[in-house]
Image: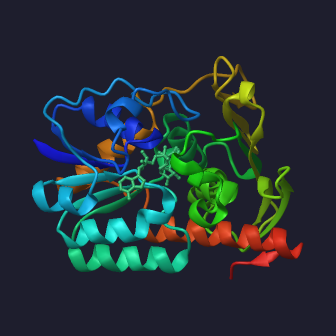
């Protein structure tokens, strides 16, 4: 039985709680949150995606407000690190150095040097560090990766990814709306699609991005074209200035020579492959969601099982490098090379 700790019981901490709670090979032994009122506050509905558990059963779980104390007093096998982004590098390093495996939420850190320090800490500790790029594990996205990579439907001609959300309002002391602490919309929200583009097509040779600002002058909407050494047209759009009643939507369409693959979480069916000949169909996908499946992968890796690497630390770092280039492209108004 794995002894698990959750650090940060906000939106993502509650999401990870649900996933760990659903496993019979793991026990949530400890939760750490700086908010001393966390037992009451965890009852609030938070976040923009369904699935965060707001009826936490604290029975048998030790609650800490001091992270170092939790690490010192509990003999944990792994920690779900679901703290605000500006704390990822510091706390992940501390956990690894104490000999505990870490599943750290995305984005890996605020910038490439932070990621490099986390990679070095993982290497020297010999412990597992996985970054929560849940979209790589999301059943329809994972199936799409499989289909595109198989080459069954020929080359990709074009692809568009979209991720739109109402303004995030739930984060503790509103850290998420502070560019210096979250990296803003590009690093917090849009990175999901940047990372998936990176996973599907590899590192782009350059990016060209455009940004829209909110009424406070903060970047709130981004559109990027990812440039490769062929003529495929790859774009992604991410924005979090939608109105509260909009909620959250993610979608994509991939145009291949012999099929179009579409996903739209608001449609029924959400996922379809439309082949050149014959009827559109919905491929079978894995049960669960990206959070459940990334945790399943993490547990297998900790247990020493040989599994195909879905996400690597270098890939997580390089996705941040791409997002940094996207932000630079908006600032400079030009194409930014990644070569
Ligand atoms: N994978 C996804 O789909 C997804 C979605 C949303 C957020 N995220 C990521 O998850 C991370 C957390 O985001 P969130 O939306 O859950 O934030 P949040 O503000 O809802 O939760 C953060 C929690 O950490 C606690 N905390 C803050 N400082 C602390 C400290 N020093 N010690 C202990 N606890 C502390 C806060 O009290 C709060 O409960 C971010 O990196 C974010 O980018 C990922």
Task: Give the residue furthest to the right.
Answer: 333
Res 339 quadrant in image: bottom right
Residue at 69% from the left image edge and 21% from the top image edge: 267
Side of 45 relative to 34 (left or right): right
**Residue 234 can be seen in this image:** no
Of 191 and 296, which appears nearest the observer?
Answer: 191
Residue at 51% from the left image edge and 47% from the top image edge: 172
User: Would you place residue 137 above or below residue 187 in this image?
Assistant: above
User: Would you place residue 37 above or below residue 328 in this image?
Assistant: above
Q: Position of residue 65 (x, y in %)?
A: 28, 51
Q: Position of residue 126 (x, y in %)?
A: 21, 73
Q: How many marks?
A: 0
> Looking at the figure, which quarter contains the N terminus?
top left
Residue at 78% from the left image edge and 32% from the top image edge: 243
Q: Position of residue 310 (x, y in %)?
A: 42, 55
User: Would you place residue 84 above or below residue 161 in this image?
Assistant: below
**Residue 252 can be seen in this image:** yes
User: Would you place residue 302 above or below residue 119 in this image?
Assistant: above
Residue at 27% from the left image edge and 37% from the top image edge: 20
Q: Position of residue 115 (x, y in %)?
A: 46, 73
Res 75 quadrant in image: bottom left
Side of 43 relative to 110 (left or right): left
């Amino acid at each position: 039985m794995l002894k698990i700790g959750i650090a940060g019981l906000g939106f993502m901490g509650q999401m990870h709680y649900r996933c760990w709670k659903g496993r019979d090979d793991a026990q949530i032994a400890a939760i750490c949150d700086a908010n001393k009122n966390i037992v009451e506050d965890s009852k609030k509905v938070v976040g923009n995606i369904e699935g965060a558990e707001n009826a936490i059963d604290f029975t048998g779980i030790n609650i800490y407000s001091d992270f170092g104390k939790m690490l010192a007093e509990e003999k944990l096998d792994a920690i779900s690190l679901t703290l605000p982004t500006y704390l990822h590098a510091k706390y992940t390093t501390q956990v690894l150095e104490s000999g505990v495996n870490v599943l750290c939420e995305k984005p890996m850190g605020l910038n490439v040097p932070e990621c490099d320090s986390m990679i070095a800490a993982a290497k020297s500790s010999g412990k597992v560090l996985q970054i929560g790029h849940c979209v790589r594990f999301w059943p329809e996205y994972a199936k799409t990766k499989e289909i595109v990579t198989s080459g069954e439907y020929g080359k990709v001609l074009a692809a568009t990814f979209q991720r739109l959300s109402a303004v995030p309002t739930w984060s503790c002391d509103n850290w998420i709306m502070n560019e210096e602490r979250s990296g803003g919309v590009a690093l917090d929200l849009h990175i999901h699609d940047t990372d998936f583009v990176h996973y599907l097509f590899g590192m782009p040779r350059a990016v060209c991005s455009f940004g829209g600002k909110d009424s406070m002058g903060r970047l709130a909407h981004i559109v990027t074209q990812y440039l490769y050494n062929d003529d495929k047209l790859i774009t992604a759009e991410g924005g979090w200035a939608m109105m509260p009643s909009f909620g959250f939507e993610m979608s994509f369409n991939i145009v291949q020579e012999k099929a179009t693959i579409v996903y739209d979480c608001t449609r029924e069916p959400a996922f379809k492959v439309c082949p050149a000949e014959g009827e559109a169909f919905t491929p079978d996908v894995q049960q669960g969601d990206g959070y459940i499946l990334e945790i399943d992968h993490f547990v297998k890796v900790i247990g020493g099982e040989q599994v195909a690497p879905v996400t690597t630390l270098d890939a997580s770092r390089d996705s941040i490098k791409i997002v940094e280039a996207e932000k630079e492209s908006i600032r400079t108004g030009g194409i930014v090379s990644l070569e």
